[in-house]
Image (cartoon, grey):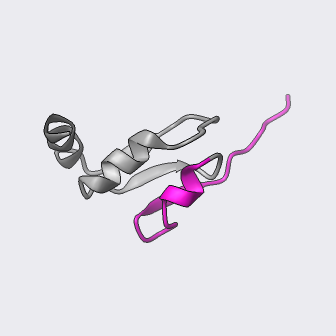
Amino acid sequence: MALACAHYSASEVKVVSSRQEAFGQTAREAHACGTPVVAFNIGGLPGTIDHKRTGYLATHLILRI
């Protein structure tokens, strides 16, 4: 975990761009290292990220052409 923390701490923010996420493990790891997370409001991420406090939860849009 120390090596992962060094990587997460070197970042300003962790972006989780998945549109399907069951547990949000990388978001939890980033939070454990003090790095805010930006992700879609799906799966297990809303339970991990406190919107506008510990990160940002974006709305996922489905565009139909």
* Residue most extreme to the right: 65
Percent position (x, y) of residue 10?
16, 44
* Residue most extreme to the top: 65
Secondary structure character of the magenta stretch overall: loop
Q: Is residue 61 left or right of residue 51?
A: right
Nearest to the observer: residue 45 or residue 62: 45
Percent position (x, y) of residue 57?
56, 57
| Screen quadrant of the N terminus | top left
Q: Is residue 8 left or right of residue 27?
A: left
- Find residue 31 and report its image quarter: bottom left
Percent position (x, y) of residue 11?
23, 45
Tell me which segment is drawn in magenta.
44-65
Nearest to the observer: residue 2 or residue 57: 2
| Screen quadrant of the C terminus | top right
User: Residue 56 colored magenta?
Assistant: yes
Percent position (x, y) of residue 14?
36, 45
- Rendered residue at 52%/48% (across/down): 39
